[in-house]
Image: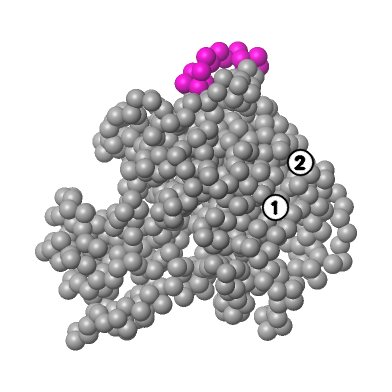
Amino acid sequence: MNQPLWQPSLQRIASANLTAFMRHVHEQYGAEPADYAGLYTWSIADTERFWHAVWSFCGVIAATRGDVVLASKHAMPGARWFPQARLNFAENLLRRRDDATAIVFWGEDQLKSRITYAELYAEVSRLAQALRAAGVSRGDRIAGYMPNLPGTVIAMLAATSMGAIWSSCSPDFGVQGVLDRFGQIEPKVLFSADGYFYNGKTIDVLPRLREIAAQLPSLEKIIVVPYTRAAPPIAGIPRAVNVHEFMAPYLARNIRFERLPFDHPLYIMYSSGTTGVPKCIVHGAGGTLLQHLKEHVLHTDIRAGDRLFYFTTCGWMMWNWLVSGLAAQATLLLYDGSPFIRNGNILFDYAEAEKMTVFGTSAKYIDAAAKFGLEPRKTHKLGALKSMLSTGSPLVPESFDYVYRSIKSDLQLASISGGTDIISCFALGNPLLPVWRGELQCRGLGMKVEVFSEEGRPLRGEKGELVCSAPFPSMPIGFWNDPEGAKYRAAYFAKFPGVWCHGDYVELTARDGLVIYGRSDAVLNPGGVRIGTAEIYRQVEQLDEVVESIVIGQNWESDVRVVLFVRLRDGLALEPALIDKIKKRIRDNTTLRHVPARIVRVADIPRTKSGKIVELAVRNVVHGLAVRNIEALANPEALEHYRNLPELQY
C-alpha cells in the first residue's frame, strides 16, 4: 500500500504533547530531535536523560527523585531505576481534586453513575482509613474479585495509598481460577461485588464467594460491594461486611500517602498458566507510573479533559493501564458487561453520549463490529473521538479498512502491543505519524525493541522474536514466591541471556512500524484473551471419562479458536452428552472464553521423552506446518492422529 490510511494534520502535530516534549528535551537536555525517529534514537541512546525528562515533563509527584536515574545499568535483569526516589502511586493518580468528572460508569444499560475528582479523593480517604483500622499495612495483599466499577478503582487507590499491594481478577472466573491466583499471594482482604450483569442477565457471585472464602485461610476481611442489589445477603459468608457499613464510621480527610521506594510492589498480575498455576508477576509502583505516563501523555496524547475509555475487565492489564489515566487528569469512562447489547451499539452509544475522545478496545471487538454490520459513522455523532486503540491480538488489515470506512475517517487508529509481563507496551500509537494498513505505528520511546532471529541476529523486514535489549522501568521486580529469581529469569531471559524475549512473532518494517503475527509460544489467544492450556487441563482431566487431553489454538477466520483433543477411557465414545459435560466443567470453573470451540477424540497424545505433552507440535500439524525437534518425542507417530482432521475444517 503506497498511501497511509490516516495522516495527522499540521495543527494536530503542532498541538501534540509529543511535540511539546521534543521542545522540552531540546531546552532542558540539549537534544535536537528533528522528528520522532530522532527522538526515539535519543531515547534509547541516552536512556537515563530520557526517563529523567519523562519524569519532569509529566510532573511525577514525589518526596524526592534523587540524583541517580539508573543503577546497575548493564544488568538485565537487575538494573534499578531511580533508587533514591520516594513516591506514592495513588497520590499521583489523585493529583486532581476539583468538581470536574473523574469517572463515568455504565453497567450495560442497567446502571449509570459518575463521580467527581473531589468525591473520588473523599471516598478513597474514607476507605483507606477503614482499611488501616482493619489492620492493613504496607506490603499486605488486597485482592479484588470485581467488575469494572468505580468502587474497584477506589479500592485499588485506597490500598496502594498505604503501600498495600493490589491484585484483581474479574468475577466471571470460577472458584478454581480464583484460588489458583489469589491462593498463591495470600491476601488479607478481598473485595467482591455481589454479582454482575452480562448480556441483560444478572449473575450472582455470592455462592462462589462463599466457596472462595472457605478456601482462602489468609483472609481476615471480605468487603462486599453492592452492585446488582442494594442489600446483598452476606450473612452466610464468614468475615464479610458491606462496604458501606465498613466505611460508615469515617469522614473524608487528607490522605496519609506512604511515600515508598520506586520499586515498591504495586500490583500482582498473573501469567496465563500454560505450565501449571499462573505465575504471579510483581510490578513496581514507580515503573508502572512512569511508563503509563509516557504512554498516555506522549503516545496517546492524553491531557486534562480527555475522556478515556478501554473495554476491559479487571482481569486484564488494560484495566490497570486505563486507571492510570487519572494521573494524566483524564476522565475515565468505565463499562462493565457485554459490548454487544443494543444490537451491538452500546459502546458507540456511550462514545456519543459521553463525548469519548479515546476509544480503546480489542481487535476481536472491531472484527465483531464489522461482522455485525455496524456503521457508527452513519448512526452516531463521534465528533469528539480523536483516537481508537486496539490490542489483545493482532489487528488484521481488513479491520483497519473497516475502522476508516465505517467508524470515522479522521481518526488515529493505534494498534498497540505489550503485555501483562510489562504492564505496558513495546509498540504504540503516535500522534505525529501516519497510520499504515496492518502496521503498529512505532516502537515505544525508551524501549530498545528489536527483532531477533533464532540465533539472536537483529532482523528487519523478516519475521522473528520480539525482544527488548536494554532495561526499561516497567520490567517486573520479580515473581511472587521466587526469592532467587530463577523463575523470572527463565521466563524472559533464557532464550537470549541479558535480553528480554517477549514471546511474540513479529516483523520490523522499513517504516519502523511493527507487524505482529501472534504469540510464539503455546498460549491460546481467542478474541485477544490470553488463556493458559493448564487452566483447561486442570478441569478436563478431573472428569472420569477423560484419560488425558491436549489443547491448542487453531487459526480461524482472522482469529484463534480453542480446540481440545481428548483421549477417553476404553469403550467410551465422545457423545454429545459428554461434550456438554466437558464444556460445562470448563465454563463453571474458568470463564466462557476457555470453553473449546471444537472437542475431538484422539487415540494418543504426543509427548517428549521426559513425558511432557507437546502443544506446539500438535498445533503445527493442524496448520500443515513442519514440526521441529521430532527426535525429542517419545511417540512421534502420535502426531499423525492430528493431520487433516475433518472436524477442524468447518
Residue 440 x/y as whole percent: 43, 35
The part of the image, by quadrant, that contains residue 358 is: top right
SS type, badge 2? loop
Q: Is residue 51 left or right of residue 36?
A: right
Residue 629 x/y as whole percent: 17, 51
Q: Is residue 211 above or below residue 125?
A: below
Q: Nearer the viewer, residue 130 or 586?
A: 586
Query: Which circle, 2 or 1, is nearer the viewer?
Result: 1
Amino acid type assigned to the residue bearing label 1 in the image: Val
- Residues packed near mark 2 inside 10 Å, few (<14), some (14 to 19) or many (20 plus): some
Q: Nearer the viewer, residue 544 or 119?
A: 119
Q: Which mark is residue 104?
A: 1
Q: Is residue 534 left or right of residue 86?
A: left
Q: Nearer the viewer, residue 70 or 597?
A: 597
Quadrant where the image shows the C terminus: bottom left
- Residues packed near mark 1 inside 10 Å, few (<14), some (14 to 19) or many (20 plus): many
Q: Which stretch is magenta?
A: 25-39
Q: Which residue is mark 2?
A: 95
Residue at 55% across, 37% down: 387
Residue at 79% across, 56% down: 123
Q: Is residue 373 above or below residue 327?
A: below
Query: Which tag, 2 or 1, sits closer to the chain's start?
Result: 2
